[in-house]
């Protein structure tokens, strides 16, 4: 059986869509995310189902609902051709109208006349029930139109009253602040109908109830404190599509919407300094094997120098290991999106400045937006990528030739994203002595460190990237031998689901990063 749902606009995110698909996996969903006709407003798009050429019943449901207890009985409720099944709106004191628009079940061919009537004068019907005082605008009335028109030719039947109930947010203004109160406004009436002692208690709805409908214009069910008891993904799963209209970085949206709540950054970064492992002990292939894959990729896509303000740095170049499908400049190769841009004014992180960007969403600085891996990259670096216990974010393969400078370590000092957002693995594949990493300073969370380190082939390095650092090469370092490193940025606290395009809190969420590293939990096959 097909189930039709309307999800137009930003009020209800993908969280609700995934919830319904998980609850009803045996059914095929039809999602209306754009009006089927540009004259049709919001929930009036439910009429779409009445024009389907289908010889079996379909269900039409609102997405601001909870399905509880033995809820499948609602969808299995039998109807015959000529009948129209709806959810009762028993909580209303209305002698004329008795249904609620949160659930319909019908044979589409039975209802083609309803669709035709609506389409014959869309604007008239979308305003009719507002103008006659039956309901309030700006958009409303579709359930009254359906009920009136069903009665013209079909038998209207409803689900049992005690199968459905209303959960409602009301608004009180106290001290100039708008406060929401969540309650069953008509729970007494419910008890009169069913003789039940309660509607909702202790995280459970009464066993009779199968569908809970949130029925108020200010309803956003995920704001109800107990909603997380019924939909485990609330505040745990960040759907990228829900923020397509935002002009902020994905990480900013994650912070603004509490996805990093309960991360104590000081505790998470405690003791975090500098770490060194061998490729073998972490379960990675040899440097020679990884370098062979890198060279295969280079031969197919080439290298790009770092770009800033119409200048391309030829001595620092490489290719990207990940890409952002929504990168703001579609002229940039998806294999080189992490190699700067002409709007950038410096070589390093957004902590320095953001350059000439009018907005920074989907730019180089949008770390979590770099979440896709090309097949070419994966096929040649499969043994590396598959061994990571965290998904790749903005990452690259970097080629560096020495600069002829009197003080090669004077420039380029920077800090990167906090390791609570992204950990970095640095894997040298080709180098020579003279190249060094310098770290000096503190991270503002009680950690400080100072070192000057030659990074060796065959090793893997991690460090606290919130402490200022730079790389350079001493005078006399071979000017013709590229220093080649994989720089792997990993999402520390979130897994990534490409199919759903979402980030979900992982098993490491909020844990101390030093402990994760010393116990080698960031890889799958440590020895």
Image (cartoon, rainbow, N blue to C red):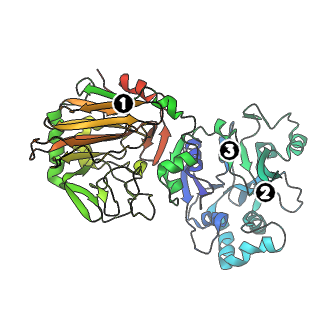
Q: Is residue 383 left or right of residue 176?
A: left
**Residue 189 horizontal/vertical position (percent):** 89, 45
Name the image quarter holding residue 98.
bottom right
Image coords of residue 215 (percent x, y):
75, 53
Q: Is residue 510 visible?
A: no
- Is 507 displayed left or right of 438 in the figure? right
Mark before the other along the chain sequence, 1 or 3: 3
Q: CA distance from mark 2 to mark 1?
A: 68 Å
For residue 421, what is the image quadrant?
A: top left
Q: Position of residue 178 (x, y in %)?
A: 77, 52
Secondary element at image label 1: strand
* Label 3 sits on residue: 66
Residue beneath the point at 30% across and 23% down: 526
Q: Which mark is residue 194?
A: none
Q: Which residue is painted at 88% across and 59% down in the image?
A: 94
Q: Earlier in the sequence, mark 2 or mark 1?
A: 2
Where does the C terminus fall, quadrant-wise?
Answer: top left
- Residue at (14%, 51%) from the top-left corner? 299
Q: Is residue 32 visible?
A: yes
Measuring from the top left, give residue 245's x and y in whole percent.
52, 61
| First in sequence: mark 3 vs mark 2 | 3
Please name which of the two marks, 2 or 1, marks the residue nearer to the observer.
1
In the rendered view, would you say 363 is above or below 372? below
How many numbered marks are there?
3
Look at mark 1 in the image and give the residue it sits on: 449
Q: Given this view, does label 1 or label 3 mark the residue nearer the observer? A: 1
346 is higher (above) or lower (below) than 191: below
According to the picture, the residue beneath numbered tag 2 turns out to be 99
Towards the viewer: 150 or 446: 446
Residue at the (84%, 70%) spot, across then down: 133
Count residues near mark 1 (Cα–Cα under 10 Å), then give few for <14, some for 14-19, many for 20+.
some
């Amino acid at each position: 059986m097909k189930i039709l749902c309307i999800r137009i606009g930003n009020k209800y995110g993908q969280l609700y869509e995934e919830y319904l698909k998980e609850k009803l996996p045996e059914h095929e969903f039809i999602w209306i995310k754009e009006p089927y006709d540009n004259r049709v407003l919001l929930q009036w798009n439910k009429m779409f189902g009445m024009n389907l050429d289908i010889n079996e019943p379909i269900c039409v449901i609102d997405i601001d609902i909870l399905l509880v207890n033995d809820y499948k009985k609602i969808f299995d409720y039998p109807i015959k051709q000529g009948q129209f099944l709806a959810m009762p709106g028993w909580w209303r004191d209305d002698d004329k109208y008795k249904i609620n628009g949160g659930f319909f079940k019908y044979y589409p061919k039975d209802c083609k006349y309803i669709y035709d009537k609506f389409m014959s004068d869309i604007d008239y019907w979308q305003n009719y029930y507002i103008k006659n005082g039956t309901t309030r605008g700006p958009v409303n009335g579709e359930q009254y139109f359906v009920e009136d028109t069903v009665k013209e030719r079909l038998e209207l039947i409803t689900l049992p009253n005690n199968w459905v109930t209303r959960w409602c947010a009301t608004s009180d203004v106290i001290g100039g602040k708008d406060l929401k109160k969540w309650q069953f406004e008509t729970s007494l009436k419910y008890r009169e109908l069913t003789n039940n002692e309660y509607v909702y208690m202790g995280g459970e709805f009464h066993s009779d109830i199968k569908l809970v409908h949130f029925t108020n214009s200010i309803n956003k069910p995920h704001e109800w404190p107990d909603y997380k008891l019924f939909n485990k993904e609330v505040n745990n799963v960040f759907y990228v599509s829900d923020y397509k209209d935002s002009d902020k970085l994905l990480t900013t949206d994650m912070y603004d919407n509490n996805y990093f709540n309960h991360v104590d950054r000081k505790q998470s970064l405690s003791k975090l300094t500098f770490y060194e492992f061998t490729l073998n002990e972490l379960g990675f292939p040899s440097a020679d094997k990884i370098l062979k894959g890198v060279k295969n990729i280079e031969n197919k896509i080439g290298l790009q120098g770092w770009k800033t303000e119409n200048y391309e740095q030829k001595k620092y170049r490489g290719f990207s290991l990940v890409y952002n499908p929504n990168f703001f400049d579609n002229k940039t190769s998806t294999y080189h999106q992490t190699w700067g841009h002409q709007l950038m004014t410096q070589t390093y992180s957004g902590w320095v400045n953001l350059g000439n960007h009018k907005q920074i969403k989907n730019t180089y600085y949008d770390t979590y937006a770099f979440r896709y891996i090309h097949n070419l990259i994966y096929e040649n670096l499969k043994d590396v990528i598959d061994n990571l216990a965290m998904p790749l974010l903005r990452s690259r393969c970097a080629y560096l030739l020495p600069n002829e400078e009197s003080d090669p370590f004077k420039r380029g000092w920077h800090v990167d994203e906090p390791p609570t957002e992204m950990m970095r693995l640095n894997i040298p594949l080709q180098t020579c002595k003279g190249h060094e990493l310098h770290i000096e300073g503190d991270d503002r969370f009680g950690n400080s460190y100072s070192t000057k380190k030659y990074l060796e082939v065959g090793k893997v390095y991690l460090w606290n990237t919130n402490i200022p650092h730079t790389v350079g090469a001493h005078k006399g370092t071979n000017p013709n031998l590229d220093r080649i490193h994989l720089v792997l940025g990993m999402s520390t606290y979130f897994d990534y689901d490409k199919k759903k395009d979402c980030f979900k809190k992982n098993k490491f969420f909020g844990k101390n990063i030093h402990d994760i590293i010393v116990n080698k939990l960031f890889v799958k096959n440590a020895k």
